[in-house]
Image: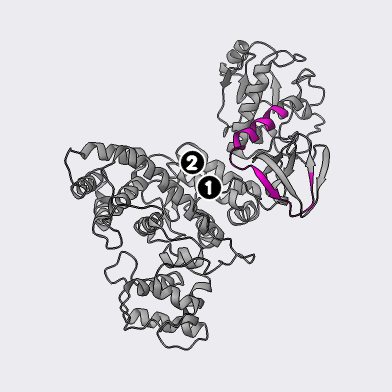
Amino acid sequence: MIHRTGGALAEIDARFRLANSFSSSHYAVAKNGDVHQYVDEQDTAFHAGVLVNPTWTLIKPGKNPNLYTIAIEQEGAAGETPTDAQYAVTAALLAEIGQRWKITPDPQHVVLHSEIRTGRDCPGDGFDRGTLLSRLTAMQPNQAAGLIQGEIRILQTVNVREGSPSSSARIMRVAPAGSTETVAGFTDQGERVGGNSYWFRTGDGNYLWAGATDTPNPAAPRRAEPVPLAASAQPAAGAVPCGIQRIDDLFTGAAAAPITSAETDAAAIGAIQDLLTGLGFAGLPTLISRTYGLFGQKTTNAITAFQSSQSLGSTGSVDSATLRKMISAPAKDPRASQVYLTLVLGFRFTGMQRILSLVAQMEGVGKFAALNRNSDRAGLSFGLIQWAQKPGRLTDILLAFSQADRNEYVRVFGDGDQDVADALIAQCKKASGGVNPKTGETTDPSFNLIAEPWPTRFNAAGLNAKFQQVQVVSALQAFEKSYNLLRQFAPDIVSERGVGFMLDVANQFGDDGVRKIYNAVHQPGMTEKDLLEAIAEETVARMDDSLKAGVRSRREGFIESRFLSDQEFAPKV
């Protein structure tokens, strides 16, 4: 909500400092472009006053607008025209606020004080909302222009709007279905249509809604992309090879003998155990178990039970039909194993994915739906690499879900209520992730994420195939960032084992934490093995006594794992 101060910024500063003041604001923008903040965005400022014949279309009847608006004062008297610096800085401030709170930059979401209090000359005739919004919308595509340029395909007839990503902007022309359009950038701050706020900027400076194109989410990650999921939202199985020859031969229908209890290929047996574990068969060995890849009685029993449930012959061995059923059947407890990442989610298995599988095992036995309910005083931690609430990482994965499929995000996390789903992100964006930094307990009882309905909602996200793909891409991007930093400060760690070890430490202690630990123990002339062992001891020493044993086991797991090579790490191979 835009206001006028009515006087100099020094006067408004003094007024808002008074303990008995009945008014406040979140921000004020000076004529020279300086910004003063008085109230945190997540807190209430009392700026709106009494409602008098409001014309604002988004007003919530019976609810005080102070509770759901952010106030921005403009220095100056009513009727004054804002300076160029005020327009520019206010547009930049709105861009930041809009990004944090997913507020669309249109006339309905950038409201004037006079629109809720008729007769109030605030911010006055000198203020031009159109000028402010044109500054804002011009700013957003320029920031993103380098991310996607070129031709997009129009899937449904769409209007091209003049100068603004809004359905209220004037229609310049119509782009028919089946045509192509040259675009120069995009914004994610446009009017939200069908849950999608992405709009493309055309070559002539106008806008069209991305939801009508073959690229509805132009900001979606483009590295480590999986194959698309089928329209039914079931995984598109078998799009890429698994990389385990026995499994690939069975899956493609090659003349391959079934995998039986006499099988000698431990990797193939382990893949079957991974699939069965994901299908809900408990007690089977996992990637870090010593019996992983051994075809014992538990494996035979699980195969037989699965075959019976699918009306297959109960042979206790895995033929092509059984394997394909294991891959196509909905997983009850999916794990980020090699076979699941490739044949179910469609990722090519590389060195970085191998490390991800092992890190995920250490964090939450490889589960996409793994939940840590504040046992480490970090609030809720979720997913493959345990995106934790207190350090702010949970926000990252929630935003990634929302950007990948807005409608599904709202369905899963808001039970269909967009306001609830967005409020979850807003809560997790607060200081310390919205929890007490000492205890990990929530600061808002409505968002006690370790109590229902939240665990059920996060579990549903973990079972969602599209969101599983988002988890993998997000985790790989985090690992790539950490790996690039690692190469700068630890050039002597080069093996796949060493890199995997260090990425696991970075996932637990953060990029800055792993750098500090490395620097604390590093001595010239140390072998990589000696260095890893020294780092392991240092990480154990930095943990609470109750967690030392688990951290020691985790470090030893990477040092001893037979699934990591001592050869030079090749992330893309």
Name the side, left or right, on which 537 lies relative to 174: left
State yes or no: discs 1 and 2 in contact (Cβ < 8 Å).
yes
Helix, strand or loop at label 1? It is helix
Tell me where residue 242 sits by quadrant. bottom left
Name the side, left or right, on which 495 lies relative to 157: left
User: Dot 2 corresponds to which residue?
Assistant: 434
Q: Is residue 437 above or below residue 17?
A: below
Q: Which mark is residue 77?
A: none
Helix, strand or loop at label 2? It is helix
Residue 45 horizontal/vertical position (percent): 62, 28
Q: Is residue 138 magenta?
A: yes
Tell me where residue 141 sits by quadrant. top right
- Give the residues in magenta: 134-159
Q: Quadrant of the C terminus?
A: bottom left
Q: Residue visible at 17% across and 43% down?
A: 526
User: Dot 1 corresponds to which residue?
Assistant: 447
Q: Residue visible at 29% across and 40% down?
A: 490
- Counting other residues with Cα less than 10 Å from the Cα at mark 2, is it few (<14), some (14-19), or many (20 or more)? many
The reply to whether residue 89 is visible in this rendering is yes
Residue 230 horizontal/vertical position (percent): 61, 65
Q: Nearer the viewer, residue 48 or 269?
A: 269
The reply to whether residue 439 is visible in this rendering is no
Q: Quadrant of the N terminus?
A: top right
